Amino acid sequence: MIRTVTRRLLLGLITVACVYALTFIMVVTIPGNPLRQSGRNLSPEAEQALRVRYNMDNNWLYFRQFITGAIRGDFGPSFSYAEWTCGQIIASALPVSVLLGFLAILLAVAIGVPLGVLGAASRGGPLDLAATTIVLLGISVPTFVTGSALLVVVGVYLKLAPIGGWGDLAHLPLPALTLSLPFMAYIARLTRAGMLDVLGSDFLRTALAKGVTRRTAIWTHALRVAFLPVLSYLGPATAQAMTGSFVVEKVFGVPGMGQHFVNAALNLDAGLILSCVLVYAAILVAFNLIVDVLYAWLDPRITGAV
Amino acid sequence: MILRIMAACAFLLIVVLALFTSASHATRADFVYVNPSGIHTLDPARMSWTQDFRVALNIWEGLTTSHPETSAPMEGAAYFPPAVSEDGLTVTFSIREDAKWSNGDRVTAYDFIRGWRRAMEPGTAADYLFFFTDFIDGAHEYVRWRSENIKALAALRRLAEGVGLEPDAAKALVRHPAFEEITIPLTSRLEVPNERADEGWAAFGKTLATLPMDWSSLADRCLTQHARDMDLHFSDVGVQAVDEATLHVRLTKPCPFFFDLTAFPTLLPCHKSVERLRRRHLGLPLTAEGLVVYDPQWTKPDYTKEGYPGLITNGAYRVVDWRFKRRLRLAVNPFHRDADSIACRTVDMVVYENVSASIMAYEAGDVDFLPAMDVPYDHELARLARTGERPDFHLCQTLATFFLNFNCESETVGDRVNPFTDARVRRAFTLATDRTTLVDKVLGRGDRIARSFVPPDAIGGYEPPSGLAYDPDEARRLLAQAGYTSGSFPVVEILYVPSDAVLCQALARMWERELGVRVELRAMESKTFAEAKARQQFMVARGNWYADYYDPTTFLDCLIGDNGNNDSRYRSARYDELMAQASSAKDPIRRASLLQAAERVIVEEDCPILPILHYAQPIAIQPWVKGLYPNAQLRFPFQYVTVKR
């Protein structure tokens, strides 16, 4: 097990390195002048000095400097926010996104799994229809619609939640719910499909024949197997949820990571783009690893495959 | 099992939430306003955004300040008006004894020199470097000298790393005295290429790196010498402290708006503690390449590296807390001379990336002031403000113009012929533009129609020319005169950013209808657009300009031949001559008439730009807030604000 985990860690490092190199190439080839942050043209003297200051004429030097700094945990300065290092920006945004993403995934599992089970258990019945409808809505309605609708209904009309912002418990439920909806829907669909497979299988029939109640058979025996596809989905989903959603953050004014992915690219903020992508890649790799380990633990049959 | 996982998750959740709620809760400030995008920088030398200016002018105080209602210059850290010499070229400021930094130190003339020098030194200088190089005597020469040296030093550092030089860097090195110390072995057969020629330099720059030289120690020697010369050269710049309280400023030309400039963020002072954060090389206050660089975090209130006390400012407020893209809290500077009379003791700037959400928060009363409401339904907000249905909504008629640039230089754009090098064509397209329809019907945001570059009724003592009115018949006649018959006109391309889509689409239809030409629209993301514009890869490109001071030259200087912001690459000897005459004119009436004549050339004759509108910005001030006045530059000093809920 330790050997496989080490191997996976090494592979993960290579993945992150490739992501870094590819992003770097994209960052230095996109058109535009990152030093032009306002609508005015810089004087040649000021521009030349800034190019010297940021090593902008030497991509290879910057490539080495950035990655050696990043390994030491120093992501260097941001172009568009001079006073903040990329490290500070991520340190301020990542915990926000992680908390929100964690809540969202928790909500998604807590609601999505039972929804899928209930749907599968009463296949074709009204419960199944209701569950499928919710799933369809969750997958097809974009978060900027659900988020804005929640904000207007709950925040403006019912006055049950503040209108955007961050720092208070009351700020959490709406964005977490909005962010969880697509994940919830997908999880419910995976669970339902998994359950339908398992419900017809021999071991479950045996369990029922041995006198296990239908409830125990479904929630304990069947779910354990049906949960596996959900688990493998949870790795990338958690990484995605925890690194922030631009739309949800924008709608609710949440100071998370998602905005930086978009704004850094629009501002041609090379350091911030690279930092965000590196952090995202690292989290993605880490969660995939965690999920694979959990997988092996839940289903001993596949230990060797990890 | 799944239950166990769930239980673990629930436990984790409780811990995280407990941590989250235990984080300190700030009470609401006396006055809360929204800044949709957060702050770009608090470093006055680097600033170029209105929302940053707004904060800067609340936490720092220049030699002069702007009146909250009329925006006229008035007393700041120095007594007003200062002594001006008869020729208008020397200004002597006396700094008030009671001008104090937020740590109680006295504000001195040296603090102003420090602040100004930061804003002109390569490395810290940014968009507003031209304030110094254009208006302060000797500054242009100083910056040029510094810049040349930095190029050479950077080239030497490059060679020390074993990297060859780009042609520009090689040229700079050859021009530098250090080049005499470089011995080129005869065997290398290396010859310095012709200074004027372009060829040969790339190879020369590459070969230099192969020479057996100790580049690093040569660079160090040059740096030491340069650091020694710097103060001597700076003493030629027209900014001198006679003593702690007296600042002499020598101008390059009469500058009737100079007291607007001294109220501008770029000319703010800087406390001496910042010197602790200056980057050093070999014990010299310069980087290895000779740049002036400070630890950029000096503007943080809680930054305490290397004995730095955190940001010290001299305005009515000081920064207490700055959270990235969340909040900026200001509190009254206890040492400010008006500290006792300021009603709003604390001010919060909160960030709402979603402007609609900020409007909802305003409607809920969470927010006292919205200085920007840039939303797709802004025409509706403008209507509410105009009709008085919402007396708390106001329209600020800003000192800013939206226009189109015609490319006056390139014969071709891409593989197409650019017809706009012909002034008659530019005039024809201007005449064929029905601005009333565009501004009032298509946009309907309450903007003012622009027929001139400088907004009318905005700058005292200057009235812009009336410009060209809508006259499609004359437009068609001019096109025919320029040799174009129906259908023979090349395809016109308008380059714009997505925010102008509606306007540009309407304009394209208008030109097609009136002139029988084909117009193609090309939208570009803003940074790519800026690049295309800078490379002259356009026929017609959107542009806008925000005034920096109350004088027509803040607009008209842009179209002078060699101005860095002359995006249409318009070159007219007559215009440049009129502008030069105006610049040296001492009589204000003659100056105004010269400027008017110059502007007439650009808006009625040569038409390098097509002014379309002067922006109106809707803002919202809660009825319980007094002392905030809509103004053209969107500057809002909070020290005069009272809040009575």
Image: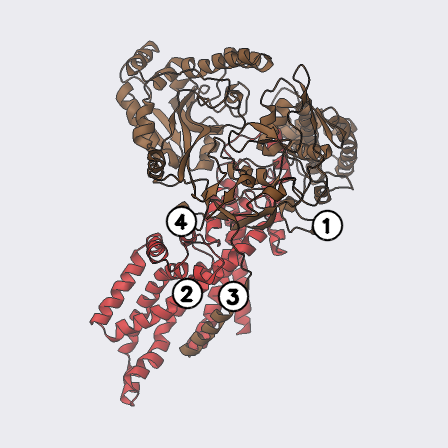
Q: Which residue is mark 1?
A: B306
Q: Residues within 10 Å of mark 4 (few under 14, many from 20)?
A: many
Q: Disc 1 or disc 3, which is closer to the eye? A: 1
Locate residue A53, reporting x and y percent.
64, 39
Give residue B606's position: percent from left, percent from top.
43, 14
Q: Secondary structure at mark 2?
A: helix
Q: Residue at x 63, y 56 (%)?
A: A72
Distance of label 4 from label 1 (alpha carbons):
41 Å
Mark 2 crowd level (few <14, some 14–19, many ≥20, 10 Å Cα): many
Residue B633's x, y, as percent? 50, 32
Q: Which chain has been coloured red in this picture?
A: A
Compute the Cα span from label 1 to label 2: 43 Å
- What SS does tag 1 mark? helix
Location of residue B421 with respect to A24 vertically, above or below: above
Question: What chain does badge 3 belong to?
Answer: A
Provide the residue designation for mark 2: A105
